[in-house]
Image (cartoon, helix red, strand yellow):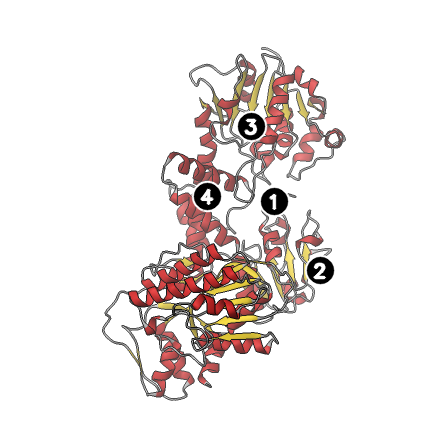
Amino acid sequence: MTANPRIGYVGMTHLGVCSSIAGASKGFPMLGFSPDHDLVAALAAGRLPVVEPDLDDLLRANTANIRFSSEAKDLGGCDVIYVAPDIPTDDAGRSDLTPIDALLSLTFDHARHDAVIVVLSQVPPGFTRQRQRAGRRLYYQVETLIFGRAVERATKPERFIVGRADPSASLAEPLAQYLGAFGCPILPMRYESAELAKIAINCCLVASVTTANTLAEICERIGADWSEIVPALKLDRRIGQYSYLNPGLGIAGGNLERDLATVVALGDCHGTDVGVVRAWQSNSRYRCDWTLRTLHGAVFAQNPDAKLALLGLAYKENTHSTKNSPSLALLRALPPVAVAAYDPVVAPQSDWHAALTQAPSALAACAGADALVVMTPWPQFRELRPHDIAARLRGKSVIDPFGCLDRAACKAAGLTHHILGVSG
Amino acid sequence: MLTHHHPQPRKPSRAVLLGVNGFIGRALAARLADEGIAVAAVGRGTVDLAADGAAETLAGLLRPGDAVIFLAAVTPDKGRGIAAFLANVKMGAAVCAALERVPPDHVVYFSSDAVYPLRGGLVNEESCAEPTDLYGAMHLARELMLKQAVKAPLAVLRPSLVFGAGDTHNSYGPNRFRRMAREGRITLFGEGEETRDHISIDDVAALTLLTILHRSAGTLNLATGQSLSFRETAERVARLSGQNIPVVGTPRQNPVTHRAYDVTAIYRSFPQFRFTPLEQGLAAAHRE
C-alpha cells in the first residue's frame, strides 16, 4: 500500500478549517494554508476561528497530522490541494468570485505540476471548466458543510460528488485514496453536473422548508399544529425522515440564497422557467419578518415602549456566525425600545440597535422585560424553565419561533407562547 | 418600503396639498396644521388641474423647496370611464409640468390599491402592479409620469380602503355601513364574505405626516395588515349604533374575492408607528 498522500487546504475558512482537521483525523498528513499570518499563528496555537461542536477536541487529538502555514511555497509539497475560500455574496445573493480566483491562481503557481487541485467552494456552473489549465489536474468537489454540524458532516459524509473535465476517466490516484478513506460512495460526473448538483441539493432543501413555512403559517390561522403533521410526512418514503420540515424564519445563512440567485440568473440567461424559485425567494423574505410582525401585533400594539429580552444573536445554534442572522435583522427593524440580549458566544454590538445591552445570562435578560424573544435555538435555551422566566418578566408574551421552551409549561406559568406553526 | 432622506423628522418649509377638498385632503390638512406645518391648500376652486393652462397656473403657486402632496383625482364614485381616465391623466400631466418648472424638495403621490389586481395573494410593495380597471391604470400611469418628471425624493402611497369621519365618498365598507345603520338596516353584497383591509383616516394622515417629515422616497402601501369580511365589519358597525340593526345578505352577483396585506414595510419604515385598533377607529367615525 502506498503512503498516504499529503493534502493541502487553501483558505482557512469555516469549510477549510473543518475539512482539514477532518482529513487529519483520517490519518492523512494535512497542510492548512492561509495568506493571513495572524490567522495561521492562531491556528498553530490551537485557537480556532470557528465554533463547532467537537472541533477543538478533534484538532487536539490529531495535531501530529496537521500543520498550518502562510507560506505559499509549502503547497509544493502537497499531492492534493483543496481550494476552499468563502465566496462573498451581495445583498441579492450574487457571488463575488474575485477571492477564489486569486487563491486558485496562487495554487496553480505554487503546486507541483502533477498535483491534483480541487475547487471546494460554492461556485456557479461553468466556473471550473473556465479555470482549467492545459496539462493540470483540476477537479470540483461539492461541499456539504452545515454550520453547527460541520465535524459530523466532514468526518462522516453521505457521499462525495466529484466533478471533472471527462467523467469517463478514472479518478486521479491520490484523490481516490483520500476520498476512499471516508468509506462513502463517490459519484464522479462532469464539472457542470457536479456544480449544479450542489445547487440541486439546496433547491430541494429550500422546497421542503418553504412548504413547511407556507403550511405552518396556515396552521397558525386555522387552529392546526404543524408539529403534529411533520411525523406523518417523515414516515412517507417519498418525503423521508431526514427531510427539512421544521418551519423557520426564511432562508438564512447566505449559501442557499446564493444558489437560488444563481438558478434565477441561469434561468433568465437561458430562457427557462424559474418562477417557482422566485416564489421561494419571496416567501423567504416574508417569513424572515415573522417575529417582527408578531412583536408588533402581540406586544407593541398594546405597549409601544415595551422593553424586550432577546435570547440568541447567532445565525443558528452552535455557531458564532451572525451573517444573515434573523436576530440581527430583527434588531435593525425594531423601534428604539430597550433590548437586553444574551447569546452564549456572540456579544451584542452597539451598531445593531440604539438601545441594545448585553445581559450576563438568559434569565438576567428577562428581568423586568415586557416580552421575551428567543431568536436562536441554542440547546441551553431549551433548558430554561418557563416558571423562572415568568418570575422575572414584567409582561406575559414569549415569542419563541422555534419552540425552544416547553409549551405546556409556558401556559402553566401564565405566559402567552407564540411559536411557528401553531395557533396562539 | 421607504428610504428616509431625513432620518430625523424635519418640517418642510411649506406643504402644498393638491386636492385639499377630498376626504384624505381635509384630514391631512388638519393634521399638518396641528403639527405647525405651513399648508398651501389647493382645491379645484384655486386650480382646475384638468383645465387647459393648469400647469402654468399651478407653477405660479409653487415655490422651490415645497413639499407637494398630490391627492387630486376624479374618484371612481364620480366616474370610472374613459373620460375620467383621460381627465386624471391630464391632471397628472399638468402637475408633472409644473413640478418640472418649479422643482420641489419632496413629492408625495397618493395612488391607490387599485393598481393591484384582485386575484388573491398577500399584497406587499413588491407585488406586481397590474391594474384591471382604468382607475387603477390611471394611478399607475401617474406614478410613472411622476417618476419621470420629479427629480426630488418621491413617495408613492397606495392606500387600502380608508374609513373615518368626514368621508366624502359612499363606497362599500364601514362608511356606507354607518349610513345604512342610521337608516335601520345594513345590506351586504352576497353574504359579505369578501375580506378587505380597512385603515382609518387618522392612520392615513399620521403615516403621510411621517412620510413628509422624513422626506421619504419609495412606495408604501397604507394598510393595517388585518383583513375582515364585510359582514364582520358591518356587524361591528351595527353594534356601535347601540340598536339592533339587522345585517342582511343579498343574492351574490359576483365571485368572492379577498385582499390581505403584508405591512412589514410600515413596521420597517416607521417602527414607532402604531395603528388605531379597528374598533377604536370605527367608534371615532361613529361619533361624527
- Residue A421 is tagged as none
Q: On the image, numbered disc 3 is attached to which residue?
A: A120
Answer with left or right where residue A88 lies relative to residue A366.
left
Decide which of tag 3 and tag 1 comes sooner along the chain: 3
Q: Position of residue A380 (x, y in %)?
A: 64, 51
Answer with left or right where residue A141 lies relative to residue A309.
left
Q: Visible in this render: residue A69?
A: yes
| Callout 2: SS | helix
Q: Identify residue type, mark 3.
A: Leu
Q: On the image, numbered disc 1 is attached to which residue?
A: A323
Q: Visible in this render: residue B276?
A: no
Residues under labels 4 and 1: Cα distance? Answer: 18 Å
Q: On the image, numbered disc 2 is attached to which residue?
A: A364
Q: Identify residue type, mark 4.
A: Val
Decide which of tag 4 and tag 1 comes sooner along the chain: 4
View extreme (top): residue: A1
| Callout 4: SS | helix
Decide which of tag 3 and tag 2 comes sooner along the chain: 3
Q: On the image, numbered disc 4 is attached to which residue?
A: A206
Q: Position of residue A71 (x, y in %)?
A: 72, 22
Q: Chain of mark 3?
A: A
The answer to which of A199 and B199 lies nearer the viewer is B199
